Image (cartoon, rainbow, N blue to C red):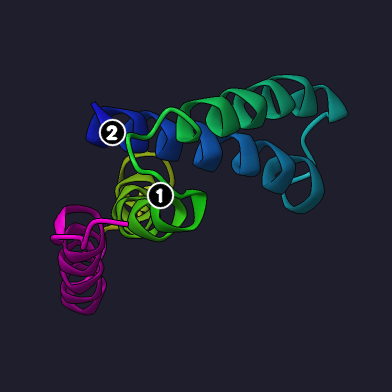
Amino acid sequence: MSIFYFIAAAGLEISGCFAFWAWLRLGKSPLWLIPGIAALILFAYLLSRSETAFAGRAYAAYGGVYIAAALAWLWAVEGSRPDRWDLIGSAICLIGAAIIFFGPRAAA
């Protein structure tokens, strides 16, 4: 379930932050902030649903998913196709996230 939460959280975080970007950088209405704030609240809630014992580990593993989702946003919403360096970097981050999330842990 954590992977689902990470993917959903990434979409919400990116869209919430993009609402602020649109307002401040693209001259959109301040009304964009209302759904943006709602998305960021839901993002924080979903990220807290992760099945890890420690918040820091959940945030670290989520980071790799966020990077991949940000590049998907770049392509799908902003219309700029990620280049090979974006894809290589994202793959490295996802591998790192998987190691952090799925790596064996010593019993505490």
Element type where label 1 sits in the image: helix
Q: Are marks 2 and 1 in contact (CB under 8 Å)?
A: yes
Magenta-colored span: 82-108
Q: Residues within 10 Å of mark 2 (few under 14, many from 20)?
A: some
Cα–Cα span, label 2 and label 1: 9 Å
Element type where label 2 sits in the image: helix
Q: Position of residue 60 (x, y in %)?
A: 41, 61
Q: Residues within 10 Å of mark 1 (few under 14, many from 20)?
A: many
How many marks the image carries: the answer is: 2
Specify whether 8 is left or right of 30: left
- Camera-side residue: 71 or 95? 95
Where does the C terminus fall, quadrant-wise? Answer: bottom left
Q: What amino acid does circle 1 point to?
A: Ala
Q: Is residue 15 shown above or below 84?
A: above
The residue wearing badge 1 is: 58
Specify whether 73 is left or right of 48: left
Res 95 → quadrant: bottom left
Check if residue 23 falls in the magenta segment.
no
Q: Position of residue 55 (x, y in %)?
A: 50, 49
Q: Position of residue 105 (x, y in %)?
A: 20, 60
Q: Position of residue 87 (x, y in %)?
A: 18, 68
- Residue visible at 67% across and 36% down? 19
Disc marking residue 9? none
Res 13 → quadrant: top right
Q: Is residue 94 shown above or below 75?
A: below
Q: What amino acid does circle 2 point to?
A: Ser
Prevailing secondary structure of the magenta residues:
helix
Disc marking residue 2? 2
Res 96 → quadrant: bottom left
- Residue visible at 73% across and 42% down? 20
